[in-house]
Image (cartoon, rainbow, N blue to C red):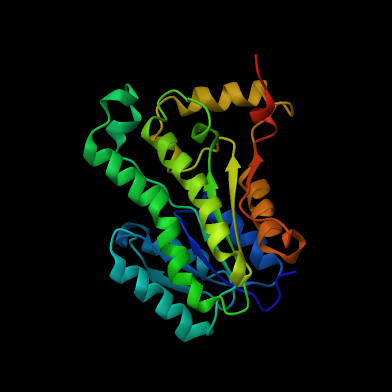
Amino acid sequence: MLKDKIGIIFGVANKRSIAWACAQACAAQGAKMAFTYQGERLKENVEELAGTLDGSLVVPCDVSDQATVDAAFEAVKNKYGRLDFVVHSIAFAPKEALEGEFVTTSREAFRTALEISAFSLTQVALAALPLMTTGGSIVTMSYYGAEKVVTSYNVMGVAKAALESSVRYLAADLGKDNIRVNAISAGPINTLSARGVKNMGSLLSYVGEKSPLRRNVTQAEVGNTALFLISDMASGITGETIYVDCGYNIMGI
């Protein structure tokens, strides 16, 4: 399905990362991928995981530093010569902004959350554009807190709303280049980044009980959806947010 396709994956922290599940799904279908890491703390984990896949590349990238973004895509160009897909699974807000009430969000926390979690998609798309010479697919990760209030999700919900809007605007801009841009709104998953949200355990229990499938979604299910959106099977889909949450988003009272 993805034989001879080249991708770059942002957001792998460890083997439980949604980004890694996406990479595994794509690798199983023949893709070769570059992986980015942010900071020396994650470098060893990313290198170890990427090393299990043939033809992989590992490069540092901090989206708050444009020079490292440019260098990452230059490394992709030097190794592969082109790019077919991007998986963007980056989000961050200071811990204190994910506690208490949204109204107390500081200016700095708001700026950080929006820059890292939302603007970085546009930043990455612009850098990828020159390498997607025959079209491509960009997939990012959102969450239901973009649409409805989720207790303690706070500024991250606002950032995810901006991310989903960015998906639509980017899809409109890049469609002429045959580049599709979509988001996956996954249900709660117990990943390293999710642990920063207060009461994540209670949220997992509640969603698992109330969703139509009576369980929580898995990383592999999100990875398979990313694979679908990247592949030609989704060639007519762009600008969409696809819910992969065991149906939780359809439920009312």
Q: Nearer the viewer, residue 118 or 45?
A: 118
Q: Quadrant of the C terminus?
A: top right
User: Residue 179 or 18: which is nearer the viewer?
Assistant: 179
Q: Quadrant of residue 218?
A: top right
The picture places residue 49, in percent across and down from the top left corner, at 51, 63
**For residue 250, side relative to residue 192 (left or right):** right
Question: From the viewer's perspective, is residue 55 above or below residue 216?
Answer: below
Quarter of the view holding residue 235: bottom right
Foreground of the two, 17 or 211: 211
The percent position of residue 1, horizontal first and vertical second, equals: 75, 69
- Seen at 44% across and 43% down, the residue is 162
Q: Quadrant of residue 107?
A: top left
**Residue 96, placed above or below residue 140:** above
Q: Seen in the image, is 96 located left or right of residue 175? A: left
Instruction: Residue at 37% x, 58% y: name it.
Output: 42
Q: Is residue 54 above or below residue 220?
A: below
